[in-house]
Amino acid sequence: MLALAAAPALGAQSKPTAAATKPPPAPRIPIAPLKAPITAFVPFDYAPFPFRGLIPDSGKKFLDKVDGSRRGHVSSRDNSVHWEDETFNDNRVLLYLPQGFDIRKPALIVVFFHGNGATLSRDVLDRQQVAAQLAASNLNAVLVAPQFAVDAADSSAGRFWQHGVFKKFVDEAAHKLALQYHDRRVEGAFKPSKVVLVAYSGGYLPAAWSLSAGQIGARLHGVVLLDALYGQIDKFADWIERAHGGAFFFSTYTESTREQNEALQSELGDANLRYKTALPKALLPGVVSFVDSGLDWTRHNDFVTQAWTQNPLTWLFSRIPGYQKAKPVAAKNAHKPR
């Protein structure tokens, strides 16, 4: 015979199930402005380097020097060799989110291309003060700065030479920025954010190719060149014409790139495209402005922090309407260029 299970004693309570003891879900915390800045160096899949493709202008291999297991790039300047393992193997990107950044409001992604002989920590953060200038501007924006050639006199664009890679880089930035925020809801807010591309000095080459081949389209809100127009003038002129008033262009320069800036102005004039040679009151879509800093070539190395005014990026960022965290503080030391 089968034994019958004993019935629970009168008044005895059954053991609660795991589901019954599970605490109720915590209320979802609203997204709020950042209480403290975030700075991180993050590897990217679509960083400019490493790169083992072809240089589009010449069709030659980028890594055109082999020494045993090492590969390198021969500089067109002086035929010196920049080795891949030393100069073109850093896929990290500087991400910076300033205190008070609020993803609930319209936000911009500032992409910064450093010049020659630079590293992200020593130069972009410390010497050029790019993150500090962004924070001081009150612009509701984040900074994304990829490493190009590490501490070398080289302007190679790497993977940004390739069609569509700059767009993929920006898309990846939205994902990586959201991870820094530690909130999955933020990624969807970053995805439509528009981009302001800033290039200094040797950053002109990857900037030109990002405009011509990057397939970023209408997501690009503006371009800033800081003594950076050393070539690729046709690519910048073509982009200004294609933008059709949908983005701004601002180029400021020393004696070092004056001739090239005048050549670009001439091309725009021939195409009946309007431009100004004065400081704009606001960097609105459609503004095309060239500003001669009045400085000679010896001031080029300090141009990111001292141009026509001290901290020029703070001055510029504070004049991008529609994206301010608060009423911008009046820029000091700003004056008309000589």
Image (cartoon, helix red, strand yellow):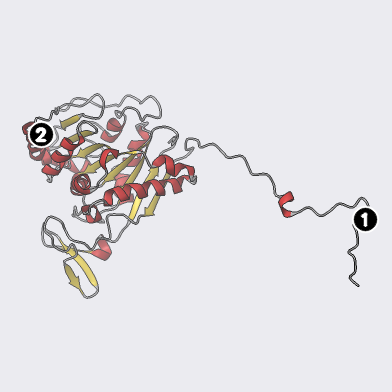
Disc 2, SS: helix
Give the CA separation, mark 2 to mark 1.
Answer: 94 Å
Closer to the chain start, of discs 2 and 1, is 1
Q: Quadrant of the N terminus?
A: bottom right
- The answer to which image quadrant residue 271 occupies is top left
**Above or below, 328 relative to 222:** above
- The answer to which image quadrant residue 336 occupies is top left
Q: List the residue tagged with mark 2.
A: 268
Which residue appears at 20% of the width and 39% of the height? 225
Which residue, as the protein is rendered here, is positioned at the far right?
A: 10
The type of residue carrying mark 1 is Ala
Badge 2 local density, few (<14 within 10 Å), some, or many (20+)?
Answer: many
* Left/right of residue 184 with respect to residue 174 in the rendered view: right
Residue 122's tag is none
Q: List the residue tagged with mark 1.
A: 9
Q: Position of residue 227 (x, y in %)?
A: 17, 40
* Left/right of residue 227 with respect to residue 33 in the rendered view: left
* Left/right of residue 72 with respect to residue 121 in the rendered view: left
